[in-house]
Image: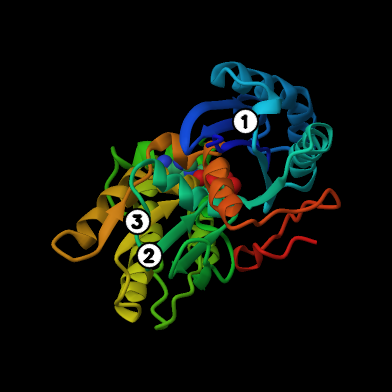
């Protein structure tokens, strides 16, 4: 039988990546990160991101093919991140994928970036349904109920800022480097919860909110500065992180109360690297029937292995796009089958 070889491309934000799965085994996972360039600006500069993707996309494809010891002719299908993400950045990956699909006459598989983060957990353990995916990144905060493979039902989401965005803004006001979540996580370990911040929303719904908390920290920092009072940065980081993570954990608890058939919880997205979140969510579900999967750190940042993983499932379901496919920077996960 012919092997199923999926080549995947990811370029939605600040990582240009290519991965290859041969019969679902990861044989190449090449990532070119732009993070050091963007750090100088305190955040991702979209225009620079697009240019760097353009410089790097062919390099990562070549390297992945070499690592896998195959040529483009051997590839069965090409999977690519179609959204959500930065429009210019997404275009580079999609144009590369479409060009390869056209030249080598290969099927094209459009993949949702957040589905990728959810499926990254399959590199640890098979997904078991129904599951609850806690999708927490710089641009998204969503609780996604999945009754089976490729079925995504958003049961709760942020009403305003994403959790990662609030980590980044709070870090910036505290003078910490980008990406702020990493710096806050590290400093919080040395700090104590001493600053009083607004308690998480208790409205009985599964929706979340992070803008009030973010603004409260920013206002408090400004007030302390105006009064010439010293700010204990580790304590501020710990106080903020405690409240931000508690808000999420409370809503996850409510979600599993309302959806008692959930067998597994998976973490997904950049904020799932947060060590306090990882520790607390495992604690919350120990001695219960729900198992928690914690993705390895390399899966919490953008990569193409996770895109290949979803691509492989979509391939099995014959979900392909034609060459008129365009990017969708705001693609909703529930709409992943609509890609005109
Ligand atoms: O998923 P991701 O790489 O990018 C988006 O597509 O949004 O997530 C990036 C976000 C940033 O907001 C970053 O500050 C946050 O993930 N992040 C963390 C940690 N590591 C990265 N937040 C909290 N704790 C961390 N250890």
Are discs 3 and 2 less than 8 Å apart at CB? no
Alpha-carbon distance for marks 3 and 2? Answer: 36 Å
Residue behind mark 1: 18
**Residue 95 in sight in this render:** yes
Q: Label for residue 131?
A: 2
* Disc sitting over residue 195 in the figure: 3
Q: Position of residue 232 (x, y in %)?
A: 37, 42
Residue 13 visible, this orientation: no
Q: Residue at x 56, y 31 (%)?
A: 20
Of the two numbered discs 2 and 1 on the same chain, state the one appearing first in sequence.
1
- Residue that lies at the very extreme toward the right in this rendered image: 324
Q: Quadrant of the C terminus?
A: bottom right
- Element assignment for label 2: strand
First in sequence, mark 1 or 3: give its number: 1
Residue 230 placement, left or right of 211: left
Q: CA distance from mark 1 to mark 3?
A: 44 Å
Near-viewer residue (170 or 194): 170
In the image, residue 103 above or below residue 217: above
Q: Quadrant of residue 199?
A: bottom left
């Amino acid at each position: 039988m012919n092997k199923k070889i999926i080549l995947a491309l990811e370029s939605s934000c600040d990582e240009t990546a290519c991965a290859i799965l041969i019969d679902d085994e990861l044989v190449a996972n090449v990532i070119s990160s732009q993070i050091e360039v963007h750090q100088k600006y305190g955040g991702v500069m979209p225009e620079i991101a697009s240019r760097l993707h353009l410089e790097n996309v062919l390099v990562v494809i070549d390297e992945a093919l070499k690592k896998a010891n195959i040529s483009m002719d051997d590839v069965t299908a090409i999977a690519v991140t179609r959204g959500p993400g930065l429009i210019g950045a997404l275009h580079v990956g999609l144009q590369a994928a479409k060009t390869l699909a056209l030249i080598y006459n290969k099927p094209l598989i459009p993949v949702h970036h957040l589905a990728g983060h959810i499926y990254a957990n399959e590199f640890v353990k098979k997904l078991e349904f129904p599951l609850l995916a806690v999708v927490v990144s710089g641009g998204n905060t969503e609780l996604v109920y999945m009754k089976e493979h490729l079925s995504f039902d958003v049961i709760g989401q942020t009403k305003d800022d994403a959790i990662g965005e609030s980590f980044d803004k709070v870090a910036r006001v505290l003078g910490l480097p980008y990406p702020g979540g990493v710096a806050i996580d590290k400093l919080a370990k040395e700090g104590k919860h001493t600053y009083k911040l607004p308690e998480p929303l208790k409205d009985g719904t599964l929706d979340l909110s992070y803008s009030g908390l973010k603004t409260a920290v920013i206002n408090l920092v400004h007030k302390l500065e105006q009064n010439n009072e010293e700010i204990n940065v580790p304590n501020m980081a710990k106080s903020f992180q405690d409240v931000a993570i508690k808000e999420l954990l409370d809503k996850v608890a409510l979600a599993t109360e309302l959806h008692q058939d959930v067998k597994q919880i998976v973490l997904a997205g950049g904020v799932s690297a947060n060590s306090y979140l990882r520790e607390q969510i495992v604690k919350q579900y120990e001695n219960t029937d729900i198992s928690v999967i914690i993705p390895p750190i390399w899966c919490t940042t953008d990569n193409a292995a996770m895109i290949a993983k979803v691509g492989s499932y979509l391939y099995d379901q014959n979900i392909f796009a034609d060459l008129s496919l365009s990017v969708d920077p705001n693609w909703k996960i529930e709409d992943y089958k609509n890609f005109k």
